Image (cartoon, grey):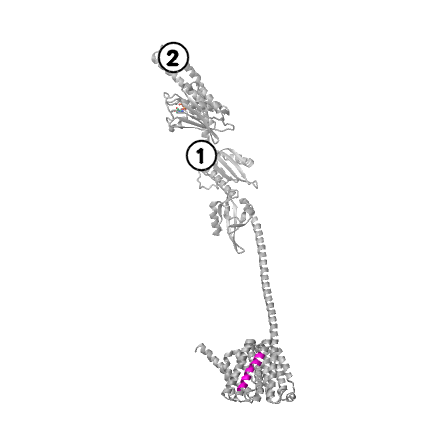
């Protein structure tokens, strides 16, 4: 079945239901019809019909029609009259419905006083005019009522309908609206309700019960109905009032019909008309009143509600505020604690970090947030500058990645890096970092040590140890108890001990030649203890061969700097075997020099004699001897001459060492002039050009320097090439030395002879090619060496030679 059909069936059922109820109510009403069978003073259907249409809608009107039709049909008249009356009843309900819906808020009509009054006026008074008029008209047309009865029938009809509308519609409308909920009642309300019901019942009994003289005597005491109704209106609301009115209405009808109560009139119809009018009016008044009371209650309720709502909202808001206040306080407290915590941890950081000699920094995401004073001192920054700097700025660029990696990977191992101070200096660092959790943040604490000095000392110690270990000298230490502690490599080799040999079991005397052991005890140890120092000759003993090794020793007693108790004896000894040889050599050298000098000096005189007498012989006997004898004489003269030259040069050579003058300020320009002038005409004869550059003043032996220049220039002339000699003399400064040069354009020298030519008697040519003794450059070298310099040559055969030598620069020596 479709929904539409569902709706239709429900409607039909509703219509039929309404028809049935209408029919029954109408039948009951019509039992009370006294003036005419179809016209009654009690007509509940009007109220039922109006209420049902207002609640269920106008479309239910066929139920009214059907109910009315059937009720009338089974009461009196025919189908036509019944239809006419039913049409009047239906129209009455529709008109009432339309008017009340339009002007009195429809089913809500009984909620407000003004609507109650409009309901009474339109639904109670106006609409029944339609039914009464049509109904009475129908009856008149059908001839079912006499014309003189028209008025009475019409009034009965109208008032009956009015009573029905005002007494029977309200309970239905209000029932629908009230949503009766007994569960809401309090015990006191139940008691009061009971009291109210009893009172009402009592009043009904008093007025219409027939047991009271009041009801029997028909006194006009209908006002007694008002108090209980007022009670109901004030205390129990419209619905209760409407129910009580219905009850009283029924009771009063039954009572009145029995001749009881205040409404007893001359006829039953009159009595009922009066009663219905009274009940209709009182119903309207009390419903209006109770609506007013309810309105007021509602207003009060609304007010109370809005008041309590306001209160509730204020309370809620207050709660909110309290909550947020508590939260705020908590936050403030937390912040305070946090701030205090931070300050405390700051203070702790400073306290702790200042107590260490290491630089300590706290960084978050590689940015420094705290640093101690040592850190600032290590890097030469102020604390203000340090804060906010990135951690890797404190190392040299090549270590920045290392630092970042350690921080990122949370390495905790100590590592080294080169630190960069503010002033740009580089220092050695040892860094240890550790990640910690602070207030939910990962921070890194880094301890930094400046190990530059430690490294330097270590390096120094290492170098020292290396120096000691690799020294050619015998170096050892021994405890004050005489046990050896250390002997260096050279020392072990010297006495025939391997490097692996454990020497700590040996005593110092084990190293000493037996004959020197008493001296060790008396002389050496005695001197060490009294003067902390001893120096002298001493013989060591070779462990394998037992051979004596002569040594020169310097020994010292090293004391503890704090307690001054002797700690250790240290000795450095030099094998004097070689020294003794060198000494011997230089001594014999000296003797040789002495001999050469004496010999050359002393040989000069006899040689001069031999020379002069041979020359005399040659001159005097020239031509008297045979040619062979002349040749011999000539050769003797030549040999003597050569010997003279040799002796002269040799003497000059040995004089460099023996005839030396103390150094004085020497102007090299003047020295050159002197040398050139000494050479006399030979320069002119050979067409020599001398170019002179700037020459400085030096500290030296004037005569020897003249000889140096003269030897070099005369060689430049002697070893000239095919072109006339051109000689350049000059100097330039290099570092702390003057570099002098004598350059020529002569025959040049093969580089392989560069070293040889400075040796005594070393010549590259025969005497027949170039005269000479081979001593000139040896003298030059000796002079230069004596003046603290060195001499060398640069040359190529055929391209001239350049002789260079150095001499130390002296203050004010610039040329
Ligand atoms: P001497 O000049 O008496 O030979 P020197 O000691 O002065 O002895 O020189 C040694 C040798 O060096 C010379 O014999 C010569 O061969 C070479 N020598 C020296 N000076 C020059 C020069 N200016 N040019 C070429 N060779 C030279």
Q: Is residue 705 left or right of residue 175?
A: left
According to the picture, the residue beneath numbered tag 1 turns out to be 547
Using the rendered image of the protein, determine whether residue 588 is visible from the camera's viewpoint. no
Between 672 and 65, the one nearer to me in the picture: 65
What range is drawn magenta here?
119-138
Quarter of the rendering occupied by the N terminus? bottom left
Compared with 304, 484 (above or below) is above
**How many C-alpha atoms fall within 10 Å of the one at disc 2: few (<14), some, or many (≥20)?**
many
Give above or below for 472 relative to 367: above
Locate residue 406, reporting x and y percent: 48, 50
Residue 528, percent across and down?
A: 54, 36
Name the quadrant where ligand 1 sits. Answer: top left
Mark 2 and mark 1 residues within 8 Å of each other at the beta carbon: no
Name the residue: 38% across, 12% down.
618
Real-space Cα separation, disc 2 to disc 1, in angstroms:
67 Å
Q: Secondary structure at mark 2?
A: helix
Query: Does label 2 or label 1 sit earlier along the sequence?
Result: 1
* Apparent side of residue 541 relative to residue 292 in the rendered image (left or right): left
Residue 274, quarter of the rendered image: bottom right
Is the CB of mark 2 within 8 Å of ligand 1? no
Q: Residue at x 36, y 15 (%)?
A: 632
**Magenta-drawn stretch, dominant element (helix, strand or loop):** helix
Residue 187, placed above or below residue 616: below
Pinpoint residue 397: horizontal percent, then vertical percent. Answer: 47, 45
- Count residues near mark 1 (Cα–Cα under 10 Å), then give few for <14, some for 14-19, many for 20+: few
Q: Position of residue 718 (x, y in %)?
A: 40, 22
Q: Dot 2 corresponds to which residue?
A: 618
């Amino acid at each position: 079945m479709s929904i539409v059909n569902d709706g239709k069936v429900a409607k039909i059922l509703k219509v039929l239901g309404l028809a049935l109820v209408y029919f029954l109510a109408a039948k009951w009403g019509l039992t009370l019809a006294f003036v005419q069978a179809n016209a009654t003073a009690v007509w509940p259907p009007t109220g039922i019909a109006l209420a049902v249409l207002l609640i269920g809608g106008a479309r239910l009107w066929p139920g009214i029609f059907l109910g009315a039709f059937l009720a009338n049909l089974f009461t009196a008249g025919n189908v036509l009259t019944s239809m006419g009356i039913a049409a009047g009843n239906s129209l009455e309900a529709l008109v009432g419905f339309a008017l009340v819906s339009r002007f009195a808020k429809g089913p809500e009509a009984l909620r407000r006083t003004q609507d109650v009054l409009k309901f009474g006026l339109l639904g109670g008074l106006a609409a029944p005019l339609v039914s009464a008029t049509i109904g009475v008209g129908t009856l008149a047309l059908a001839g079912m009522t006499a014309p003189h009865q028209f008025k009475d029938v019409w009034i009965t009809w109208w008032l009956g309908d009015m009573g029905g509308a005002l007494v029977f519609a309200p309970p239905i409308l209000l029932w629908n609206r009230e949503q009766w909920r007994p569960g809401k009642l309090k015990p006191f309300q139940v008691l009061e309700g009971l009291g109210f019901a009893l009172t009402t019942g009592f009043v009904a009994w008093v007025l219409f019960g027939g047991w009271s003289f009041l009801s029997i005597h028909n006194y006009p005491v209908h006002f007694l109905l008002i108090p209980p109704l007022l009670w109901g209106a004030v205390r129990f609301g419209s619905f209760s009032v409407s129910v009580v009115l219905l009850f009283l209405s029924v009771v009063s009808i039954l009572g009145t019909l029995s001749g009881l109560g205040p409404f007893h009139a001359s006829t039953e119809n009159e009595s009922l008309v009066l009663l219905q009018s009274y009940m209709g009016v009182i119903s309207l008044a009390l419903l209006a009143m109770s609506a007013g009371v309810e309105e007021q209650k509602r207003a009060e309720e609304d007010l109370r509600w809005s008041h309590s709502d306001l209160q509730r909202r204020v309370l809620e808001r207050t709660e909110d505020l309290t909550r947020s206040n508590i939260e705020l306080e908590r936050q403030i407290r937390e912040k305070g604690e946090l701030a205090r915590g931070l300050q405390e941890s700051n203070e702790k950081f400073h306290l702790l970090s200042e107590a260490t000699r290491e630089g300590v920094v706290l960084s978050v995401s590689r940015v420094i947030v705290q640093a101690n004073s040592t850190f600032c001192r290590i890097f030469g920054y102020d604390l203000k500058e340090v804060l906010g700097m990135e951690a890797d700025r404190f190392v040299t660029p090549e270590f920045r990645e290392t630092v970042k990696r350690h921080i990122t990977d949370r390495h905790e191992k100590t590592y080294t890096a080169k630190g960069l101070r503010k002033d740009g200096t580089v220092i050695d660092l040892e860094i240890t970092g550790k990640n910690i959790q602070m207030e939910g943040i990962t921070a890194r604490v880094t301890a930094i040590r400046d190990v530059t000095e430690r490294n330097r000392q270590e390096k120094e110690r290492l170098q020292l140890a290396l120096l000691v270990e690799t020294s050619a000298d015998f170096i050892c230490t021994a405890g004050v108890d005489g046990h050896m502690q250390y002997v260096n490599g050279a020392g072990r080799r010297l006495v025939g001990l391997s490097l692996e040999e454990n020497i700590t079991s040996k005593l110092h005397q084990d190293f000493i030649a037996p004959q020197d052991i008493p001296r060790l005890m008396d002389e050496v140890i005695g001197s060490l203890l009294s003067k902390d120092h001893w120096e002298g000759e001493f013989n060591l003993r070779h462990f394998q061969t037992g051979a004596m090794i002569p040594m020169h020793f310097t020994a010292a007693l090293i004391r503890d700097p704090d307690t001054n108790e002797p700690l250790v004896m240290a000795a450095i000894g030099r094998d004097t075997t070689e020294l003794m040889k060198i000494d011997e050599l230089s001594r014999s050298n000296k003797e040789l020099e002495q001999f050469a000098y004496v010999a050359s000096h002393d040989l000069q005189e006899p040689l001069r004699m031999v020379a002069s007498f041979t020359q005399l012989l040659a001159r005097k006997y020239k031509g008297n001897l045979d040619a062979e004898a002349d040749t011999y004489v000539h050769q003797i003269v030549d040999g003597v001459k050569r010997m003279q030259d040799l002796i002269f040069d040799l003497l000059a050579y040995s004089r460099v060492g023996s005839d030396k003058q103390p150094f004085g300020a020497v102007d090299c320009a003047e020295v050159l002039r002197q040398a050139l002038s000494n050479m006399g005409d030979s320069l002119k004869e050979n067409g020599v050009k001398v170019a002179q550059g700037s020459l400085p003043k030096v500290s030296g032996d004037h005569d020897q320097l003249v000889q140096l220049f003269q030897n070099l220039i005369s060689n430049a002339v002697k070893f000239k090439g095919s072109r006339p000699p051109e000689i350049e003399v000059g100097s330039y400064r290099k570092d702390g030395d003057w570099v002098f040069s004598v350059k020529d354009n002569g025959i040049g020298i093969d580089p392989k002879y560069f070293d040889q030519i400075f040796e005594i008697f070393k010549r590259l040519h025969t005497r027949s090619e170039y005269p000479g003794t081979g001593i000139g450059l040896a003298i030059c070298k000796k002079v230069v060496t004596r003046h603290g310099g060195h001499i060398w040559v640069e040359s190529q055969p055929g391209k001239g030679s350049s002789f260079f030598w150095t001499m130390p620069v002296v203050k004010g020596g610039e040329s």
